[in-house]
Amino acid sequence: MKLLKYLCLSIAFLSLNAMAQDQERKPGHTNQNKFKQLYDEFSTPNMYRTGSGAPGPAYYQQQADYKMDIEINDETAVLSGNEIITYTNNSPDELTYLWIQLDQNVRQKDSPSKDINSSRVTPAMSASRFASSYMKERFDGGFNVEKVTTVDGKALSHMINQTMMRVELPKPMKTGDKFSFNIKWWYQINNHVTDGGRSGYELFPDGNRNYVVAQFYPRMAVYNDVEGWQNSQFWGRDEFALPFGNFEVNITVPSDHLLDGTGRLMNRKEVFSNTMMKRYEKAKKSYVEPVVISTQAEAEVREKGHSNKKNTWKLYAENVRDFGFATSRKYIWDMMAVKIGSKDVMAVSLYSKEGNPLWEQWSTKAVASTLKSYSRMTFDYPYHKAISIHAKRQGMEYPMICWNYGRPDENGKYDDRTKYGMMSVIIHEVGHNFFPMIINSDERQWTWMDEGLNTFMQYVAEQDFGEWYPAALSPDDAKYPSRRGPAKNIVRYMGGNQDRIAPIMTKGLNTYQFGNNAYGKPATALNVLRETVMGRELFDYAFKEYAHRWMFKHPTPEDFFRTMEDASAFDLDWYWRGWFYSTDWVDVGLKDVKKYYVSSEPNQYAKNYAESRNLKLEDLNLVYLVEEGSDAFDEKLRQGTSADNSPTLKEYLMDNFTAEERKTITQPKYFYNITFEKPGGLVMPIIVEYTYADGTSKTETYPAQIWRFNDNEVSKAIASEKEIVSIKVDPNLETADIDTSNNSWPKEVKENDFDKFKNKVKG
């Protein structure tokens, strides 16, 4: 090791620039270093949110409790409701009015939501698209608010602005005050298959409907320390910001319907038959296979009759931010128990026969595996159930319940795309119970905190699912073929047209390529951070700390960024800045590789160095290095060791090492000066695979901080006992490098498409 140290010192000594520096004074500049801290972007920590990323001692959040009576008229597809909202002001501020979200108003006939997007005439289109675009009357599905009163019936002044309603308080609410008021409303439920929307119904050819119902009630907006009232309008894309509360909901539907939703079913014995109750008790003890509560045969009987009688299903939920439910007479219902920590959670699926055999095979198992994976990475799932509802074109989430697509053809056949698509959407939507239903970020402002974090966790859960249920994988798949998460899958987007890319830290409504921006890129950023930059141990600890700090609270992006650094001792400002605040891309390559041998002959560099300092070369006792292929290179240098080729080095070893020490020191024979370039703006670690002449290889990772003084190129001096025959940057495609043509030495010559075709059909 002493020899290696001596050689490195010699190389560093020789590499000093002998030329005088340019004396011309350059103009000053601002700090544009990629490792600049994020103080300019972050808000100042305060008593509500600390510099560590944790809630502060003065952190507060409001509470909204609901008592609702809901009824669906299955003949007219009208939902009507009456609710009492009890709002608690836990803030230090005095409130003179309340803001209520009326999200169904995005479906009003005169809503401006569709007019915010440009449109153009398409010279040719299908008849159905032409009719829906130019001939079909626009569906009117907004709220019809009949009254807003105090609980004793006095009218409350209110004003509706698109999807927001302001309610004037009879007197200001001070800290700790509660106020209860009543709203009565109704609206026409939309057909989400033909008219779109996050909720609604599907109409089957037999005349039955499958209702997946959400955003169905006027909901309190969030009031917090960051921006006061979060009353940003709902335009249809950005989702929701909601306070936590308790829900007591009674839902009346036809008596031949089955129904489930957010919360605990309080009157199960009234709405379940004796047979269903027995099956339910069996399901609570089944941990391997789902137990069918209502069979396909029983569902087919219900499909044929339309009862005029009604049943009321009573649900109660504590500490949830929203409420959703689903109901139909077509449902097959199965469930199984999942051990999460010290308690059992029920994994549940409701689906029509049109979903079989795919749904009976994999839906509930996907729910169960998701709960286990997410709980492992965050916290034990706190609710008593998680439900997957079969909806034709929907993937959407609410506390304890979600709707998911994926349907075989009319003959019950399905391909891998349909199967994996169904399992992935179930994993994703069930996972939303954690992000944002419990870790309650503001989806209206920061879509990626909901979709991006959840898509990252979806990737982790998909890989777990493939390990726990290998029978779910197709024969050609060694592991679950996740669509988002792996670095190589985001390359096309990040290397695309910069005019159509926005930073992740952009309001979702205003981003280009929404799926890539809100789902794919942040998920990949977290996956790369976990696997390549931090390592799983540090990442997982910090990620779990964030989850525990902010469960049942309202985090911001800064709270996430700060917690990840606080819990890991990993400075990540450069990473957040590059991946989240910019649209820079990764492109790290090999610019130049020079190979050197130790020589006894003074080279021109050494002569220039001695001359510039008026020194005698023989007094410097230098070890000389000569580049392979240069005029001064001699083939004989390949034969001897470094000491053989340099009398100066040999003398040094004899004078400074004992015979025993000389047996143990290494004698590197090959010396390389490797220059890496960074055409892409994004700072990343440099991962390099060195392959040697004896067939062995070694991978080195140089930290991202290697770029801190030069954002364009950096060099590494390598001393090796073995000859390097090839070098490859990012050999496993784990950094999202958009151009791998500059990643190899010697440069790889890739076949063009014609050559590939020619070789394929050769002969």
Image: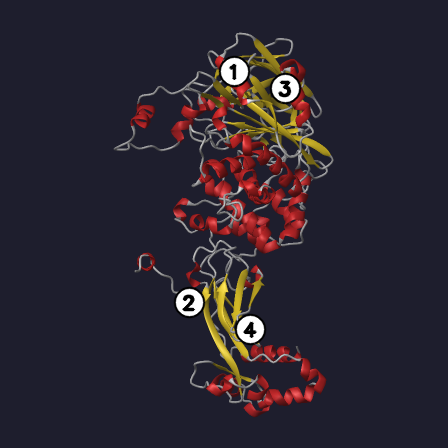
Q: Quadrant of residue 556?
A: top right
Q: Determine whether, in the image, residue 480 is placed left or right of residue 658.
A: left
**2 or 1: tag closer to the N-terminus:** 1
Give the secondary structure at mark 1.
Answer: helix
Amino acid type, mark 2? Lys
**2 or 4: tag closer to the N-terminus:** 4
**Of the pair 504 and 359, the residue shown nearer to us:** 359
What is the CA distance from the residue labelled 4 to the residue labelled 1?
Answer: 76 Å
At x 56%, y 47%, the residue is: 41
What is the CA distance from the residue labelled 4 to the residue labelled 3?
Answer: 72 Å
What is the CA distance from the residue labelled 3 to the residue labelled 1?
Answer: 15 Å
Q: Quick one: quadrant of the N terminus?
A: bottom right
The numbered mark at residue 276 is 3
Q: Is residue 264 visible?
A: no
**2 or 3: tag closer to the N-terminus:** 3
Q: Dots 2 and 4: beta carbons under 8 Å?
A: no
